[in-house]
Amino acid sequence: VQLQASGGGLVQPGRSLSLSCVASGSDFSILTMAWYRQTPGNVREVVATITSSSSASYVDSVKGRFTISRDNAKNALYLQMNSLKPEDTAVYYCSTYYNRRYYWGKGTQVTVSS
């Protein structure tokens, strides 16, 4: 499974940003997908997950602000991030667990700063 994330950047607090991840090499529609994030010196934490049936879950810190979604026809995963806070600053990764291992896309930097 190959994952390619994009869409990071620098944004002011309170603004929005959207991340995308395109998958290849497997049947995307059956995969549970997730977005993780990591800051220097900290473990990578799961931000949001979405199942093959599009059931979504979120870490408490982003509930009501972030929305994970998928488009199986495009093999694409999305993360819409609204009302961004400085503490959302991190490298964001798309990921899936398939065939008994994790797959990770190259991270994309999100920086929330005025």
Image (cartoon, rainbow, N blue to C red):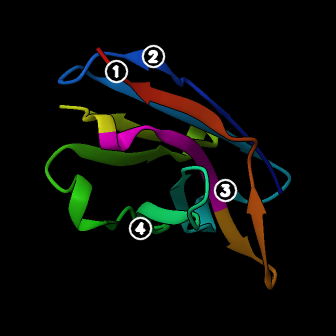
Quick one: quadrant of the N terminus? bottom right
- Residue 28's disc number: 3
**Does label 1 or label 3 sit earlier along the sequence?**
3
Q: Nearer the viewer, mark 4 or mark 2?
A: 2
The answer to which of 37 and 5 lies nearer the viewer is 37
* Magenta run includes residue 107: no
Question: Which amino acid type corresponds to the residue marked 4 in the rendered image?
Answer: Ser
Question: Which amino acid type corresponds to the residue marked 2 in the rendered image?
Answer: Leu
**Does label 2 or label 3 sit earlier along the sequence?**
2
Residue 22 position (above or below residue 72): above
Q: Which residue is mark 2?
A: 10
Give the CA separation, mark 1 to mark 3: 34 Å
Residue 23 position (above or below residue 28): above
Give the CA separation, mark 1 to mark 4: 35 Å
Residue 5 position (above or below residue 13): below
Element type where label 2 sits in the image: strand
**Does label 1 or label 4 sit earlier along the sequence?**
4
Residue furthest to the front: 41
Residue 76: quarter of image: top right
Residue contact at pointers 2 and 1, CB within 8 angstroms: yes
Q: Which residues are magenta?
A: 87-95
Query: Residue 38, percent across and down?
Result: 56, 53
Question: Which amino acid type corresponds to the residue marked 1 in the rendered image?
Answer: Ser
- Residue 53's disc number: 4
Q: Which residue is mark 1?
A: 113
| In the displayed structure image, the side of residue 58 where residue 105 appears, left or right | right
Q: Main secondary structure of the magenta part?
A: strand
The answer to which of 88 and 22 lies nearer the viewer is 88
**Does label 4 or label 3 sit earlier along the sequence?**
3
Give the CA separation, mark 4 to mark 2: 32 Å
Quick one: quadrant of the C terminus? top left
| Residue positioned 25% across, 32% down in the render | 84
